[in-house]
Amino acid sequence: MFEKLKQWRSKAKARKRIEQYDRKYRKARPISERPEHLHVEETFDAFIAEFGGKKISDLIENKAQMPLNADYLFKDHNVIAELKTLEGIYSGPDATKQLTQAYIDAGCTGSDAMGLLLRNEPVPDAAARLMQKRVRRSIEQRIKQARKQLRKSKSVFGNENTKLLILIAMDQNPLFGHRTMLFNLAKIMGDNYADEHTDGVVYLNPNMPTKISPESMEFSGWYPFYRDDDVNDELSDFVNLLGNKWLNYYGKQIGETNPILELESFDEMN
């Protein structure tokens, strides 16, 4: 009971800080004036070059036989990272089509799906279970591929102390919101992949900001978590630095220069 009270107070404190930040920096900008979406991978590549990292593909001489490799090497920090997007997982232009297909596959009808989208009707249990399974499977496919790439690049460019980081970008509007995607990502990693092949994971949401209320300002986030406390102690300084630099870099690209708001714990992100 005391632990729940502590978490509640932490979240209340975090929300107050966010609301204070929102009041100070809110900008009344019509939807029509929102910046155009940036290509996440190209933008991140340019950011990494400015940060001082290297694209591993640029370090491979034989381009004709390009091996399986991760995206980025941070030699000074002894970190290798792979960037994946969650494009197409109940997000973007095909989200409604995927939703409708899941309803049909679960024995529901297309009109039942429209009930959710148009009238906010509850999702039938069968459809909810099927969509949950498909979301989890799609995320896990990306995680498995990233882990293969990280292991390969570590064997070539790293050593036994090299830390491995997966960057997961939600670059299209998620039908079920960022919280659902982040929860599934954290659960998949905690259930199956908390080992030496994945030291940390970061969820980021460029192009798809979140709000604490409909009239609030938009927040682009950087949400890291680690496989254990020891790795947290070793890797979090680098990840926090990378995130701070990224949010500032991204902000300049879209014309937003507000200071970074740092939350104190993972609980405050929920």
Image: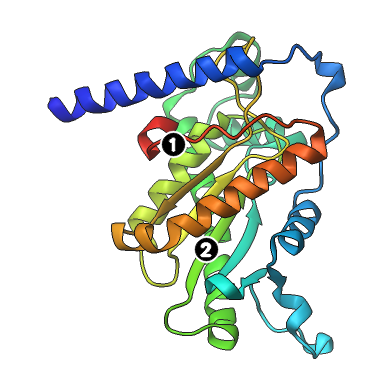
Extreme-left residue of the structure: 1
Q: Which mark is residue 149?
A: none
Q: Is residue 127 left or right of residue 42?
A: left
Q: Amino acid at mark 1?
A: Arg
Apparent side of residue 30 relative to residue 185 in the rendered image (left or right): right
Residue 131 in view, yes or no: no
Q: Residue at x 50, y 69 (%)?
A: 164
Which color scheme did the rendering employ for the protein?
Answer: rainbow
Position of residue 1 measured from the top left corner of the image (x, y, whole percent): 13, 25
Helix or strand or loop: what does disc 2 sit on? strand
Residue 163 image offset from top left, x and y in percent = 47, 71
For label 1, the SS is: helix
Do the CB atoms of the residues marked 1 and 2 lie less than 8 Å apart?
A: no
Does residue 180 sit above or below 170 in this rendering? above
Judging depth in this view, the residue of 254 and 106 nearest the camera is 254
For label 1, count other residues whose C-alpha is less than 10 Å away and answer few (under 14), some (14-19) or many (20+).
some
Looking at the image, which residue is at 53% across and 12% down?
A: 121
Where is residue 97 shown, x and y percent of the image?
Answer: 71, 34
Instruction: Residue at 52% x, 63% y: name it.
Output: 165
- Ranked by sequence position, the earlier of labels 1 and 2 is 1
Indicate the amino acid at tag 2: Leu
Q: Which residue is mark 2?
A: 165
